Image (cartoon, rainbow, N blue to C red):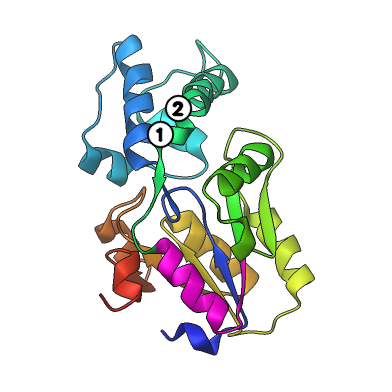
């Protein structure tokens, strides 16, 4: 995988650029504990996490016949919003973004995160200068970003083999396959290396591995 072969890089945000795995797990464990459900270790979290997140909540034992996913999801997001600035960006990300910029390759973010908060976080971490587009959802429930990806690829107008998507989940791979982009996944985000390697795409341990460190 040679980044210089591409015209545009599409980045996932959560778990790829921003390291919010520990906070995400801590918040879900608070919800689980409050309902008398089993809490997760980091290894268990990475095995069970998926998008749409409603499916992941159901696997953990949340009973949506007793309380709606919208209520539970908002409770999680309220906690995340109050603490989101505790999360830092991954080591190596600014070096990689700089390298891609120097190569003259376009970069964008495609995320299942809500647009308003995504914009706020990108600005907070001083990364806006790297991206021509920052694309998020119009809600907080992280159902899917597939429709966003399809629309965005039409805007880019790139042919097969000209766009690379970098993410950390099976959903990122699904999106890449649907929109005709190549895919690289990073294994220190929200899903385990074992799950990602089963997809048959390139999987790196972390961003520094892409830089050859």
**Residue 45 position (above or below residue 205):** above
Q: Could you say which is closer to the camera, residue 154 or residue 86?
A: 86
- From the viewer's side, name the closer residue of 113 and 58: 113
Q: Position of residue 72 (x, y in %)?
A: 51, 19
Residue farthest bottom in this picture: 5
Residue at 43 percent across and 44 percent down: it is 50
Using the rendered view, name the quadrant where residue 151 is placed.
bottom right
As drawn, the label of residue 86 is 1
Which residue occupies 58% across, 67% down? 10
Task: Name the residue: 43% across, 71% down.
Answer: 96
Q: How far is mark 2 from mark 1, CA to CA?
A: 6 Å
Chief secondary structure of the magenta portion:
helix
Q: Is residue 74 among what the camera can see?
A: yes
Q: Quadrant of the C terminus?
A: bottom left
Residue at horizontal 28 percent and vertical 53 percent from the top:
192
Q: Are marks 2 and 1 in contact (CB under 8 Å)?
A: yes
- Residue 65 as seen in the image, left or right of residue 20: right
Q: Residues within 10 Å of mark 1 (few under 14, many from 20)?
A: few
The residue labelled by disc 2 is: 83
Counting from the top left corner in percent of width and height, residue 175 is at 57, 62
């Amino acid at each position: 995988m040679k980044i210089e072969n591409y015209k545009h890089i599409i980045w996932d945000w959560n778990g790829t650029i921003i390291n919010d795995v520990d906070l995400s797990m801590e918040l879900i464990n608070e919800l689980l504990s409050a309902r008398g459900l089993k809490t997760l270790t980091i290894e268990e979290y990475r095995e069970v996490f998926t998008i749409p997140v409603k499916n992941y909540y159901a696997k953990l034992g949340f009973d949506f016949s007793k309380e709606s996913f919208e209520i539970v999801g908002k409770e999680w997001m309220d906690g995340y919003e109050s603490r989101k600035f505790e999360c830092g960006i991954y080591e190596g990300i600014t070096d990689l973004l700089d390298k891609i910029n120097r190569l003259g390759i376009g970069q964008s973010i495609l995320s299942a995160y809500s647009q308003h908060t995504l914009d706020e976080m990108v600005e907070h971490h001083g990364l806006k200068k790297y991206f021509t587009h920052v694309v998020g959802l119009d809600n907080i429930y992280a159902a899917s970003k597939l429709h966003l990806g399809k629309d965005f690829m039409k805007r880019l107008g790139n042919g097969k083999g000209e766009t690379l998507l970098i993410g950390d989940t099976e959903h990122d791979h699904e999106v890449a396959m649907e929109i005709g982009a190549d895919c690289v996944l990073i294994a220190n985000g929200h899903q385990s290396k074992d799950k990602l390697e089963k997809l048959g795409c390139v999987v790196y341990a972390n961003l520094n591995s892409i830089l050859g460190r």
